Amino acid sequence: MSGSGFHVHGPHDHELEHAGAHDHAESASAKSGHSSMTSQIAVWTAVIATVGALFAYMGGLTQANAGLYKNNAGMKKTEAANQWSFYQAKSTKQSLAEFARDMSPDGRKQDWQTKVSRYEQEKAEIMLIAQKLEADATDWDQKSEAQMHQHHRWAQATTALQVSIALAAMALLTRRRWLEWGMRAVAGVGLAVGALAAMHI
């Protein structure tokens, strides 16, 4: 520096200023890139969490439906068993009426035959009811299994989205791009499995 307050830069000073400006630009660029990455991951996390909440709700709903349908199947099976017991009782009465018919004198045979015919008709009606109840029970069982399969799909999709959110947190903490891409990939898997659940596949 001169006596009049005038400062002359040497080559060394010039290089230091240039390096400082370059470092400041790189730092600003890095901060801008990190801020952009943080914003993107935050948005992705919010979207994934929202979709995950919907998937979790659907998973709970299908599980509840599966239990309800299984309960309906059990009730239908019980009703069918009761009808088959009723059928057996009618068969026993028919057998006794046939025995009585065969052992009765000719004048009473027609009365016993009328009872035999009535029991036969009642048995046929009871059998139709029992078979219908068994078919209903099978139908409810199949619906229950379909709901449980769908529940498992929703659970798988929800789990994948939860893993994706965990990867997002790790990406924010470590600032690793590969974790961000991993988050997106796992979220994509979760969305695909959720689509399969929605299509009952």
Image (spheres, rainbow, N blue to C red):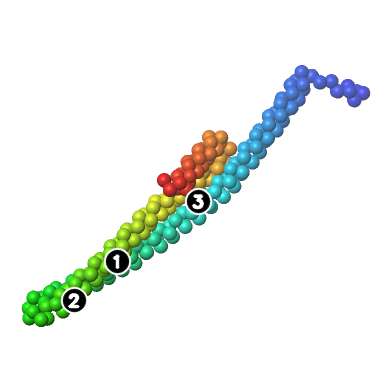
Q: Is residue 179 visible?
A: no
Please name the residue that numbered disc 3 is placed on: 55
2 vs 3, front mark:
2
Q: Callout 1: helix, strand or loop?
A: helix
Please name the residue that numbered disc 2 is placed on: 115
Q: Which residue is depicted at the point 14% across and 77% down?
A: 110
Instruction: Give the percent coordinates (x, y) of residue 38.
Output: 62, 40
Whole-angstrom CA distance, mark 1 to mark 2, is 21 Å
N-terminal of the two: label 1 or label 2?
A: 2
Q: Is residue 181 left or right of residue 116?
A: right
Q: Callout 2: helix, strand or loop?
A: helix
Q: Who is closer to the viewer here, 50 or 72?
A: 72
In terms of image quadrants, where is residue 120? bottom left
Q: Who is closer to the viewer here, 160 or 166?
A: 160
Q: Is residue 29 visible?
A: yes
Q: Which residue is depicted at the point 31% across and 62% down?
A: 132
Whole-angstrom CA distance, mark 2 to mark 3, is 61 Å
Classed neighbour count for the residue bearing mark 2: other residues with Cα under 10 Å, few (<14), some (14–19), many (≥20): some
Please name the residue that numbered disc 1 is placed on: 129
Q: Callout 3: helix, strand or loop?
A: helix
Instruction: Give the percent coordinates (x, y) of residue 36.
Output: 65, 37
Q: Amino acid at mark 2?
A: Lys
Classed neighbour count for the residue bearing mark 1: other residues with Cα under 10 Å, few (<14), some (14–19), many (≥20): some
User: Is 1 above or below relative to 135?
Assistant: above
Instruction: Give the percent coordinates (x, y) of residue 10.
Output: 79, 19
Are discs 1 and 2 less than 8 Å apart at CB? no
Q: Amino acid at mark 1?
A: Ile
Count the marks.
Answer: 3
